[in-house]
Image (cartoon, rainbow, N blue to C red):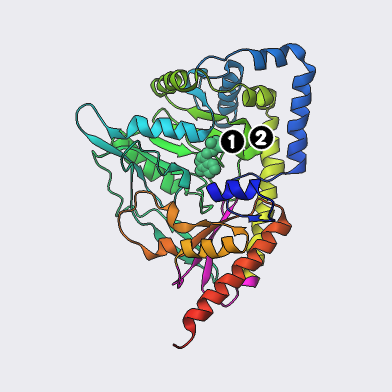
């Protein structure tokens, strides 16, 4: 994160393929600019938005619009009592994880079970003073010459009294994996059997931004905590997270908002409430955002396949989000070293080994992968890929030379 911040602030022409910023999609930007103009033109609404605190649960009109959208879209029995806002879903996870994991009054310690790694790097370090996660290695299936996919290893996944919740991101950051309906059904059952909340991180999921290229049925019931965000719609700067959960969890989130920040920010809700109420947010997601990333994924994969043809590399099948997860089998250096070499050449990616929170065993595979974002300007992504390919070829070739 520090390197990414320095790169953005500096003057060098860095290929920033490492960050989580959404793409600048002109039609989407124009829709949000239009919403902003509408807000500014309505003096009363604007003055209220910037001048008043909302309640600690978050902006009431937006919450009502979200509940209505979820009723209409999926038929879920969600009321405004099932929705709370936060200052970005990163803060939703901080509160939820520390609510369900840690040291409890009865002396027990509980962890969050991540059924599949690699998993979102932002979850790491959220435990206040203790290791917070538990996980196990996934199953890998190879697909054709250049792709692969991770699957949850249900035989190894042991749920027990030491767990406080189960959590998955769907689509998954960093891999672009979308857990299948069967996997989600099995996890949901496991969570219910052990009386655990099932947290689904939908930062890239349905109903918005809906950056999902495969078939995936969304689920919610009172045992599920669905975390949404406005960020990946192109609104990362407004910092709005949305938690959909049973009333008791919503009350806890509301209480923690009151303590941490009095109330979540009003700006994101003020900007998009009309769009949520009218359903146009879904048109933006489905007609503009999803096809944009789907096309970008296809093009970027084409560049990678031609740049690295003949070398031992595979791409996790991109089923959603906006990252490609590259696996260089038997990479002679660690992914962290590769990251450093690429940084020297002004290409920033993220080393794979940081995406395995809670994995106790040493797994060489975790040091053979990198995450590359394809959300930036295509010219920058292509330039970055050329340099990645040069470095990878040099590394394999050097290792293959007789000593
Ligand atoms: C999977 C996932 N979850 C949560 C977040 C946090 O999003 P935000 O705090 O911007 O809502 C991100 C951001 O990159 C993410 O990729």
Identify the image quadrant of residue 52.
top right
Residue found 69% across the figure and 56% down from its top: 13
As rendered, which of 277 and 301 lies closer to the eye? Answer: 301
Q: Position of residue 67 (x, y in %)?
A: 55, 23
The local secondary structure at tag 1 comes to loop
Residue 319 forms part of the magenta stretch? yes
Residue that protrudes farthest toward the bottom in the picture: 402
Residue 271 forms part of the magenta stretch? no
Compared to residue 313, the image places residue 324 above or below, namely above
Mark 2 Cα-neighbour bin, 10 Å: few <14, some 14–19, many ≥20 = many
Say which residue label 2 marks: 282
Q: Where is residue 264 in the image (x, y as percent from the top left)?
A: 54, 22
Question: Whole-Å distance between the Cαs marked 2 and 1?
Answer: 7 Å
Residue 258 visible in this rendered orientation of the protein: yes
Compared to residue 100, the image places residue 329 above or below, namely below
* Disc 1 Cβ-to-ligand 1 distance below 8 Å: no
- The reply to whether the C-beta atoms of the residues labelled 2 and 1 are less than 8 Å apart is yes
Picture quarter with the C terminus: bottom left
The local secondary structure at tag 2 comes to helix
Q: Which region shows up in magenta? A: 307-333
Residue found 45% across the figure and 65% down from its top: 368
Identify the image quadrant of residue 383.
bottom right
Say which residue label 1 marks: 207
């Amino acid at each position: 994160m520090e390197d990414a911040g320095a790169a953005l602030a500096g003057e060098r022409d860095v290929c920033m393929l490492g960050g989580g910023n959404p793409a600048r999609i002109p039609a989407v930007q124009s829709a949000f600019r239009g919403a902003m103009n509408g807000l500014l033109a309505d003096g009363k609404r604007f003055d209220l938005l910037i001048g008043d605190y909302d309640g600690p649960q978050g902006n009431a009109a937006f919450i009502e619009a979200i509940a209505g959208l979820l009723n209409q879209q999926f038929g879920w029995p969600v009321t405004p009592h099932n929705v709370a806002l936060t200052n970005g879903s990163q803060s939703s996870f901080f509160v939820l994880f520390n609510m369900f994991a840690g040291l409890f009054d009865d002396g027990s310690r509980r962890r969050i079970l991540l059924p599949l790694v690699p998993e979102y790097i932002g979850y790491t370090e959220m435990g206040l003073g203790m290791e917070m996660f538990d996980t196990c290695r996934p199953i890998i299936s190879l697909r054709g010459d250049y792709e692969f996919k991770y699957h949850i290893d249900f035989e190894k996944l042991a749920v027990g009294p030491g767990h406080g919740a189960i959590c998955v991101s769907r689509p998954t950051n960093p891999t672009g994996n979308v857990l299948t309906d069967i996997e989600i059904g099995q996890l949901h059952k496991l969570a219910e059997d052990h009386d655990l909340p099932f947290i689904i991180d939908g930062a890239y999921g349905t109903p918005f931004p809906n950056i999902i290229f495969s078939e995936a049925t969304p689920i919610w019931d009172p045992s599920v905590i669905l975390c949404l965000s406005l960020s990946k719609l192109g609104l990362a700067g407004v910092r709005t997270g949305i938690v959909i959960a049973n009333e008791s969890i919503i009350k806890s989130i509301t209480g923690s908002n009151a303590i941490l920040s009095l109330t979540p920010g009003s700006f994101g809700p003020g900007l998009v409430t009309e769009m949520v109420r009218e359903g146009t947010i879904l048109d933006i997601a489905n007609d503009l955002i999803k096809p944009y990333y789907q096309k970008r994924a296809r093009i970027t994969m084409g560049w990678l396949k031609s740049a690295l043809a003949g070398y031992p590399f595979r791409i996790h099948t991109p089923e959603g989000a906006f990252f490609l997860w590259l696996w260089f089998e038997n990479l002679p250096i660690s992914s962290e070293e590769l990251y450093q070499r690429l940084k020297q050449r002004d290409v920033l990616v993220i080393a794979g080994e940081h995406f395995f929170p809670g994995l106790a065993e040493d797994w060489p595979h975790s040091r053979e992968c990198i995450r590359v974002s394809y959300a930036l300007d295509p010219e920058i992504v292509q330039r970055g890929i050329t340099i990645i390919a040069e470095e990878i070829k040099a590394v394999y070739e050097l290792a293959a030379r007789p000593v």
